Amino acid sequence: MYVAYYLHWSFPDILGLEHPARTRVIEEIGKIHAQSPAPPGTHEW
């Protein structure tokens, strides 16, 4: 569901990817997520 959440892809579309491609997509989303700032209201004071 990680890929579906970030890319708004359907579950069948995600499962339709070959495993190496799916792994690569997940890694790229992780990189983007790590670089993005925290959503408003979630930072610690």
Image (spheres, rainbow, N blue to C red):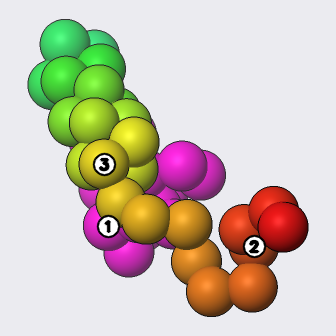
In front: 17, or 39?
Answer: 39
* Residue annotated with mark 2: 42
**Residue 27: x %, y % from top left:** 29, 26
Mark earlier in primary sequence (2, 3): 3
In front: 44, or 15?
Answer: 44
Residue 30: say if magenta. no
Extreme residue in the bottom direction: 40
* Residue annotated with mark 3: 35
Real-space Cα distance between discs 1 and 3? Answer: 16 Å
Q: Residue at x 81, y 62 (%)?
A: 44
**Residue 4: x %, y % from top left:** 46, 61
Determine whether 19 is above or below 45 in the image: above
* Residue annotated with mark 1: 7
**Residue 1: x %, y % from top left:** 59, 52
Q: Nearer the viewer, mark 1 or mark 3?
A: 3
Q: Amino acid at mark 2?
A: Thr
Callout 1–callout 3 Cβ contact below 8 Å? no
Q: Amino acid at mark 1?
A: Leu
Callout 2–callout 3 Cβ contact below 8 Å? no
Disc 2: CA contacts within 10 A as few (<14), some (14-19) or many (>=20): few
